[in-house]
Amino acid sequence: AAQIAAWKEPLDWPFAIIVEGQPVGVIGLYGMDLWSGKAEYRVLIGHEFGGRGIGTAASRLILKYGFGRLRLHRIWLGVTAGNVPAILTYIGAGFRPEGVLEDDLVRDGQRFRSLRFGILESDWAVDNGLATLVPCRCGCGKMIDVRRFLHGHRPFNGLREVWAKINKPRDGC
């Protein structure tokens, strides 16, 4: 029982973000639950380094590390609803909106709404061209080839449209 309890202890994996030999921020996976295969993603980049794509590039690397090396199933994050640059970075890295938490954060005595985003390993694998078969979301157990939902000549183009089609109830499922 002590060994299982140790597995359930949260783990943190912070990393410095270095650009041209200069530290510009920190990124990591926090509260990692290896038993459930999930972790919280956090990133902080200095304001003077914003808008250069550093956050998106670092986010893609930490997702690759989390899903590829650590074999996580799900990575999630929370963000203040008004932080539009961060939200765009997260969406660009493949995160999808999961929910809204009212009055979730307190700063300077004010309460703020936060948004939850997440990404599953299977979605990340499809986004990165590593998988084409995904389980049907209705729970029927069928595997769906996402290539049949893609249009245009570029592979894995328009993934949001793909998921909308996959998640629609269909006859026979």
Image (tube, grey):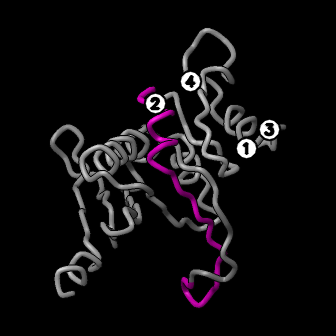
Dot 4: few (<14), some (14–19), or many (≥20) neighbours within 10 Å?
Answer: some
Q: Secondary structure at mark 3?
A: loop
What whole-number distance in Å separates the C-alpha atoms at marks 2 and 1?
18 Å
Mark found first going from the N terminus, 2 or 3: 2
Residue 10: x and y in percent read 29, 76
> Which residue lies under the disc numbered 2?
131
In the image, which is nearer the foreground, mark 3 or mark 1? 3
Residue 69 lies, with reference to residue 9, above or below; the image says above
Q: Can you tell which mark lies on residue 172?
A: 3
Dot 1: few (<14), some (14–19), or many (≥20) neighbours within 10 Å?
Answer: few
**Front residue of 17 and 5:** 5
What whole-number distance in Å separates the C-alpha atoms at marks 4 and 2?
10 Å
**Left or right of 63 in this view: 18:** left
Q: Secondary structure at mark 4?
A: loop
Mark found first going from the N terminus, 4 or 2: 2
Disc 2 residue type?
Answer: Ala
Q: Which residues are magenta?
A: 106-131
Look at the numbered discs 4 and 3 and tell me whether their residues touch, using CB distance below 8 Å. Answer: no
| Total numbered circles | 4
Disc 3 residue type?
Answer: Gly
Which residue is outermost to the top? 153
Look at the numbered discs 2 and 3 and tell me whether their residues touch, using CB distance below 8 Å. Answer: no
Q: Quadrant of the C terminus?
A: top right
